[in-house]
Image: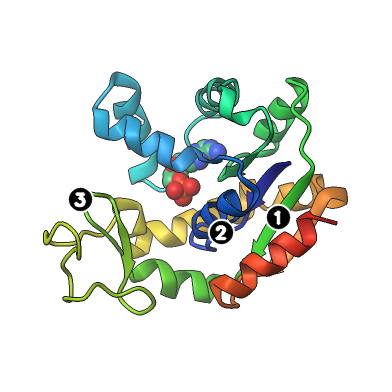
Amino acid sequence: MKLIFLGAPGAGKGTQAARISAALAVPAISTGDIIRSAIKEGTPLGLEFKRYTDAGCLVPDDLVNALVKERLSKPDCVNGFILDGFPRTIEQAKFLDENGIEIDRVVDIEVSDDTIVKRMGGRRFCPRCQRTYHVLYNKPAEEGICDTCKVELCIREDDKPETVLHRLSVYHEQTEPLIAYYEKKLCPVDGTKSPEEITEKILEKVRV
Ligand code: AMP
């Protein structure tokens, strides 16, 4: 089962990719996570990525394509995978086609811009263990403190309000055209339902 998860930033792709990965026993591959870990390691490539992510811009196609190609060549991908946050441009989708990577289904998690802005403004993460929280939907036991590490929670640089608005416009301009590109494989789901309901819907649609 080779799946792509589409949706605006903050639509819940990461949460659902983890749940569907467990249900179908295929790895969830997040280009955002791969990029963030390169940034954390401080490699020259990581420093280049940081310039783009901090500004809410997409990392150039050739760099992300190379990361994805490498990751998909790993043995755990032989029975399928979930691509979370890739492709994000038509060029990236063509890269998959040109490399003979045939996708079975494309899940589109639909959420309005207003809801996205509310959700992303409340996201927090632990700088030590990377665990994520939300001030409304997924609160830590003690406000602003990681349950596990007891350190103060932070806001991702690219979750700051002005960057969120920019990321949404980048999404509409560069990523939304993929909905038409994948029209025949598309499985739209309502991303405003509960996480459990969304998982159930996705499983129902991709298994058809
Ligand atoms: P995410 O966690 O998926 O929202 O990704 C965080 C950031 O990583 C994005 O705002 C982009 O700067 C970068 N990124 C992630 N995936 C891609 C991609 N497929 N193409 C280009 N940039 C990406």
**Where does the image place residue 199, in percent across and percent down from the top left?**
63, 65
**Where does the image place residue 36, in percent across and percent down from the top left?**
35, 39
The residue carrying mark 3 is 127
The residue carrying mark 2 is 16
Three-letter code for the amino acid on which mark 3 is drawn: Pro
**Where does the image place residue 19, in percent across and percent down from the top left?**
55, 57
> Mark 3, residues whose alpha carbon is within 10 Å: few (<14), some, or many (≥20)?
some
Q: Which residue is drawn at 77% across and 27% down?
A: 97
Q: Residue at x 69, y 26 (%)?
A: 95
Corner quadrant of residue 87: top right
**For residue 186, side relative to residue 189 (left or right):** right
The residue carrying mark 1 is 107
Q: Is mark 3 on a helix, strand or loop?
A: loop
Q: Give whichever of 127, 43 is nearer the camera.
A: 127
What colour scheme was applied to this rendering of the protein?
rainbow
- CA separation, marks 3 and 1? 30 Å
> Mark 2, residues whose alpha carbon is within 10 Å: few (<14), some, or many (≥20)?
many
- CA separation, marks 3 and 2? 22 Å
Find out whether the residues at labels 2 and 1 contact each other: C-beta distance under 8 Å: yes
**Quarter in which the N terminus is drawn:** top right
Earlier sequence position, callout 2 versus callout 1: 2
